[in-house]
Amino acid sequence: MRAAVIHNALNGMRPDQEDTLVQAHAVHEALVSLGIGSSILSMSLDLEAARNELAALSPDIIFNLVEELADDIRLAPLAPSLFAHMHLPFTGSDGQALTLSGDKVLCKRILDAAGIASPAWVLPDGTFGGMGGGEGGASFVTGRYLCKSVHEHASLGLDENCLVEAACVQDVTERLAACAAKHGGHWFAEQYVDGREFNIAIIAGEDGAAPQVLPFAEIEFLDFGPDKPKIVGYAAKWDEDCFEYRNTVRRFVFPESDAPLLAMLEKATKACWQAFGLAGYARIDYRVDGDGSAEHPFTAYVIDVNANPCIAPDAGLAAAAQRAGMDYAALIRRVVRAGLAGRKQNFE
């Protein structure tokens, strides 16, 4: 068997961009350790060049790590769409799933239609939804909102300045305009849930079995203090010298009292897998409101559906797989087998 590990061509060297190369080399080495021949290719917006290169290589499986093209994450779905066009098996989700989950506003509308909870939201024109009564059909709910890029991943541009205390919808739209002016691109705001944060990884089952939710991971905010917002922003993910990076840690062990919450997260994660047509591997991020008491029951809000999450050895997905008894090579083998099985069904 021969595999092609494909990543997007890099036009910069931000830490999150460098991580793309880390993933590519780690996957390549894992494939080789499994006795699978492997080549690393980079892909640009020149789809004809990519098509010719893949046709010449004719791999048995493509391990897709393309996160963006021409610095635009909205173009990432072109990669799996090209592979499908060429009838080449590939790992992970297809172009449609990447499109549906990659636009965070569209993602929230799909979650709402599927009956999966996510925080209320506001658009730059003042349209809002998720506040009861359907889109634009209820009164604006005052409180804290977090401004987020509609399309960017890796928490690019996300920091404490993205939080706004809103007494009216105009307070939110003004902060959205400021974020767009500073960072560019399209922005929306999400009601800030000042609760626990979970990253739940899910992978395709063995031999056509139901998808497997991996051990639950909670992000703990150590020594943040009552006035410091609990946000996993860009610095917390990529700046190793900052407080947020050192003090946001992952844990996998929970008390028995969290059992109802964990069951709720597992159910919601499987529902997301179905609603978005995910494949291979994915990660769903949550903020949780409530403490599980009768007065304040748990509510798990989906804040991100990652159809193509980081699969580097030190990333959350690999750490969760390790907790499930899968070393890195075993994780890569599971993803490859899912890619081969899924695409074979689609092409027959």
Image (cartoon, rainbow, N blue to C red):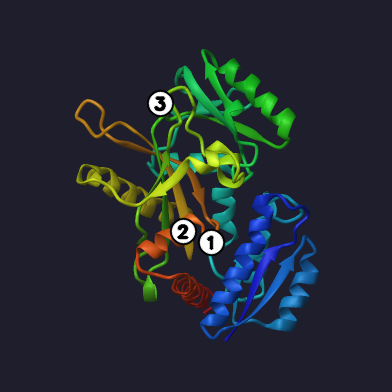
Q: Is residue 174 above or below residue 149?
A: above
Classify residue 285 by image quadrant: top left
> Which quadrant is the N terminus positioned in?
bottom right
Distance between the Cα atoms at labels 3 and 1?
A: 37 Å
Q: Name the residue under label 1.
A: 311
The amino acid type found where label 3 is placed reads Gly
Residue 45 locus on image (x, y percent): 77, 60
Give the SS element for disc 2. Answer: helix
Give, as a three-letter code, the residue at label 2: Leu
CA gap between label 2 and label 3 equals 34 Å
Q: Residue at x 32, y 50 (%)?
A: 267
Callout 2–callout 1 Cβ contact below 8 Å: yes
Q: How crowded is mark 1: few (under 14 residues within 10 Å), some or many (20 or more)?
A: many
Gap between marks 2 and 1, in whole Å? 6 Å
Task: Kindly tell me whether residue 223 is visible in this rendering.
Answer: yes
Vertical order, 65 against 144 (above or below): below
- Label 3 neighbourhood size at 10 Å, few (<14), some (14-19), many (20+)? few
Q: Name the residue under label 2.
A: 317
Q: Which residue, as the protein is rendered here, is positioned at the far front? A: 241
Left or right of 315? Residue 206 is left
Position of residue 188 measured from the top left corner of the image (x, y, whole percent): 59, 32
Please report whichever mark, 2 or 3, sits nearer to the chain's N-terminal start: 3
Kindly report which numbered mark, 2 or 3, lies closer to the viewer in this rendering.
2
Residue to which mark 3 is pinned: 132
